[in-house]
Every structure is written in structure tokens, then in C-alpha cells.
Image (cartoon, rainbow, N blue to C red):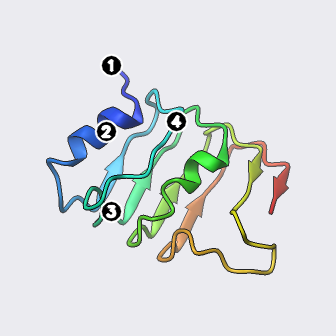
Amino acid sequence: MKYDWSQFLACARMWPDIEELKVANNNITILESPPCGVLSQLKHLDLHGNNIQDWEEINKLGSLTRLEYLNASSIGVSRIHFPAASSAAKTHLFPALKHLNIDNNNIQEVG
């Protein structure tokens, strides 16, 4: 059985201190920002193999202030864009991010 992001968020309320979430190869195509207090301790998120396709969906997770590792490999994105950030500017999204895996995507544009 494969789940979407809203189903994982509903379950995440039961785990207020979760630090690692692996939801690879599910039915996630659309993301939403977690409600206040949900996934607030998350450091490691694996979205590998979901058919997300649009980096704007990934940006919805940018408020996860403790997220250090994001696996966005094989999600079908071709463009990576951070709002209100030029190529030389620092984005306010993902402030703790140290590792980003974007393998196996057909990325044509970053900006």
C-alpha cells in the first residue's frame, strides 16, 4: 500500500519527537507545509522515488528548521528554484540543511 503526504502528516502528529522519516517510493506527488509542531524535530527526510516533479513542492518543506538531510533523488524534477533568491544569494529555506541528494533527476535549470 502506498501513501500520500497528507496521510504521513496525519500520522506524524503521533510522533512529536521523530528525527528521521523515510517515505521513499510512495504515492507522494504534492507536499504541504507541516502544521506548527509537526515534524519540528525532523533532521532526515527521504522522499526518494516519489513522483513529485515540481521543486516548488519541495520548497513547502523549507520551514523545517532542523532538517539536515534531504533525499530528493529520483523524484522527477527538472528545475530547482528557491523563491526570492538570486544565484548568489542565500535562501531562507532549509536553514539547517547540510546534505541534499538530487541524484537521478533530469535537472535542466537551477536558480
Which residue matches tag 4? 30
| Image x and y of residue 22, in percent | 36, 46
Residues under labels 2 and 3: Cα distance? Answer: 13 Å
Lower sequence index among marks 2 and 3: 2
Secondary structure type for disc 4 = loop
| Image x and y of residue 106, in percent | 78, 42
Lower sequence index among marks 3 and 1: 1
Residue type at mark 1: give it. Answer: Met
Quarter of the image for residue 8 reads top left
Relative depth, front residue between 79 and 104: 79
Residues under labels 2 and 4: Cα distance? Answer: 12 Å
Q: Are marks 2 and 1 in contact (CB under 8 Å)?
A: no
Which residue matches tag 3? 42
Which residue matches tag 1? 1
Residues under labels 3 and 1: Cα distance? Answer: 24 Å
Which residue matches tag 2? 8
Name the residue at the left extreme. 14
Q: Residues within 10 Å of mark 3 (few under 14, many from 20)?
A: some
Image quarter where the N terminus lies is: top left
Quarter of the image for residue 109 reads bottom right
Lower sequence index among marks 2 and 4: 2
Residues under labels 2 and 1: Cα distance? Answer: 13 Å
Residue type at mark 4: give it. Answer: Ile
Residue displayed at 79% across by 48% down = 107
In front of the other: label 3 or label 1?
3
